[in-house]
Amino acid sequence: MSEAYDRGAVEDFGRWQEFRAGMWAWIFHKFTGWVLVGYLFTHIAVLSTATGGAELYTGTLQGLEELLIVRLLEVGLLAVAVFHILNGVRLLFVDLGLGLENQDKSFYASLVVTAAITVASVPTFLAGV
Amino acid sequence: MSEHYSSFDRGGPRWLLQRLTAVFLIGVLAFHFFLLHFVNHAADITFMGTQARMSQVGYFATMVMFLITATFHGVNGVYNALVNQGLSGTRKTAVGAVLTLASIALIAQGIRVAIAMTNLL
């Protein structure tokens, strides 16, 4: 079981050298969560062009996809989503009482797998730009 | 004893719903990314292709459930993070109201867009 732990204020980031794996996982999960919820609102806004007709929708999406910065941001989004998923699975296991003793190793594994999937996806995301 | 970090009060309804929606989202988010970036390349997406997918009842229902659960999971996560960082009193009530309204607006607009993507109307 876990126990209450006074981690102090995250805003006091000057303490970062004291942070251990679990703290970094918590910060990364929070950061990726903020990015994903922000993207969700943006995503629906862009897809809303579908209410303006087929040409507007197709033109908007294909126009965005022609921009290198959009492709690079998509790679970043993939990295953020994959880490949030993998660390989320890790959190579910910890909540079920499984793997708390190895939670630092599972955090490092989440980072390594995220990096591997992200790097492997770069050619697909940048194709044709 | 290992340290357990979380922005949530374990055992509460917000904590439980966050976990339940997470289980659904893990699968659907991975499916969504894979389908629209690897099976169908994002640069090749057209309204016709989107309409063909969204006009399938199962796909449409999955995407609407994806929208609702993702909105809840995201906004609930933001709310709990803010409460965890000390948000309380009137501010907590106000932030909760604003986030609830934003969620309702996003889901309503998302469903409107989803319907516009089908050939049902």
Image (cartoon, helix red, strand yellow):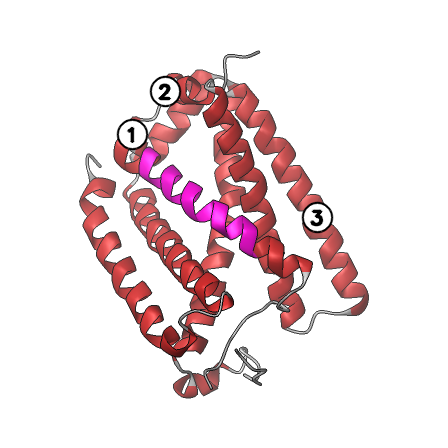
Q: Is residue B8 above or below residue B30?
A: below
Residue A68 percent coordinates (x, y): 27, 43
Residue A91's spot in the image, x, y percent? 46, 64
Instruction: Give the overall secondary structure of the magenta segment.
Output: helix
Q: Residue at x 30, y 39 (%)?
A: A67
- Residue at the disc numbered 1: B40
SS at circle 1: loop
Q: Is residue B60 left or right of residue A84?
A: right
Q: Is residue A28 magenta?
A: no
Question: What residue lies at 37% left-to-right and 39% top-to-bottom?
Answer: B31
Residues at circles 2 and 1 in contact by the CB criterion of under 8 Å: yes
Q: Return the x and y of residue B15 as percentages of the image width and height.
A: 61, 61
**Position above or below: A94 against B70:** below
Whole-angstrom CA distance, mark 3 to mark 2, is 33 Å
Where residue B54 sits in the image (x, y, percent)? 46, 22
The residue range painted magenta reads B19-35
Q: Amino acid type of disc 3?
A: Thr
Q: Identify the residue under disc 2.
A: B49
Tell me which residue sits at (31%, 74%) in the image: A105
Q: Chain of mark 1?
A: B
Q: Is residue B61 left or right of residue B28?
A: right
Tell which subunit mark 3 falls on: B
- Is residue B24 rendered magenta in the image? yes
Q: Which residue is mark 3?
A: B100
